Image: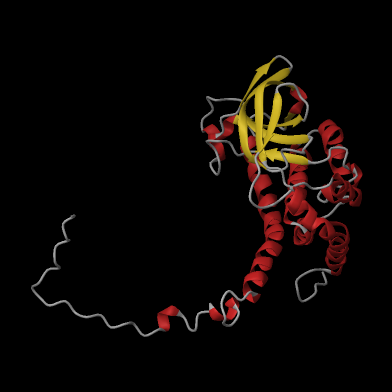
Amino acid sequence: MLQTPDGLTPDEIEFRDEVKAFARTEIMPLAGQIDAEDHIPTSIRKKIAEKGWYGILWPKEYGGYGGSIMKFCLASEQIAYASGGVGATFNATVLCGLPMLYYGSEAQKRKFGTRLIKGDYVAGSIGITEPDAGSDVSALKTSAVRDGDFWVVNGKKRHIDNVGVAQLLAFWAVTNPKAEPKHRGFSTFVVEKGTPGFDTLVTRYIGLKGLECGEMHFDNVRLPADNLIGPEGHGFYHIMRLFEVARTGAGGWGRPDASGCGRSSGSARWWSGPPTSTALRPRRPRADRRPRPQRPRPRGRSPPPPASPR
């Protein structure tokens, strides 16, 4: 396949330029407003949905874009360049649909997935992190107990992107607390905003304005059995597959923020000298520098005892 010097195919370059033009004209002019108000206008989310980018990884038969992981990264990068908060909310909505895409039934893809990628749901979210379970996802405590044709869910999620605006949320809960090893004891579910007993709490952060991170609260939430995604007990494997995409997309999303910090710090003059990018650059590798001579300690003499407190 023909590739350009930067490793992209002509089709990928065309897609990148399309997203770039959209981000510069539709998002960037509102970036200051988003930061000031800590709110992303719904019109931006709708326009992204109209482009089909929420379904960038979905096949066209479901109304998706039919794109690749590379195009997901390119879209994340260009959107985040215009606004970090919009880039993060875009990623969260895309990731919300992946459990259904990869493991959901045909009915679940049609009921939840197509509505998410078309923008019928304003945004999506994923709920993994809990007060006592972060990187160790096998330590989840949120529980789901089968009761006839329903699952009764109780627990709390924390640090969840888009939680204040998402209308469809994928989450994970323990369905078999006696499973050994324990990572085989939890499963994947989806919940719609407005379900009785389900509530959210937004906790504002310093950066990523407009993302509306926060908590998910489950208080005897009764979910239909059809809201279970994939086989019971396979939730851990679903998360690992999701992380493969999420971390790749996060690389695209984080790149413009990192480069922006570099440009900002590199051009600023914090004192009456050269730019910091020049002044703080190491002159030569530390290992090559001449060591500072140390005064030898006389033999047979131990260091003086520490002074007693006054």
Q: Residue at x 86, y 69 (%)?
A: 10
Q: In which quarter of the image is the N terminus?
A: bottom right
Question: In the current view of this chain or complex, which residue is farthest to the front?
Answer: 310
Count of numbered marks: 0
Is 224 on the left-hand or right-hand side of 238? right
Residue 96 % position (x, y): 75, 41
Q: Nearer the viewer, residue 101 or 36?
A: 36
Residue 46 % position (x, y): 88, 46
**Looking at the image, residue 14 lies above or below residue 200:** below
Q: Which of 228 and 52 is in front in this view?
A: 52
To which quarter of the image does residue 113 belong?
top right
Residue 245 % position (x, y): 70, 51
Q: Which colour scheme is used?
A: secondary structure
Question: In the current view of this chain or complex, which residue is farthest to the top?
Answer: 148
**Looking at the image, residue 288 lies above or below residue 174:** below
**Looking at the image, residue 77 lies above or below residue 153:** below
Q: Residue at x 80, y 33 (%)?
A: 105
To which quarter of the image does residue 112 belong?
top right
**Looking at the image, residue 138 lies above or below residue 177:** below
Question: In the current view of this chain or complex, which residue is farthest to the left?
Answer: 300
Q: In which quarter of the image is the C terminus?
A: bottom left
Q: Which residue is drawn at 71% across and 64% down?
A: 256
Q: Nearer the viewer, residue 282 or 1?
A: 282
Residue 264 % position (x, y): 66, 70
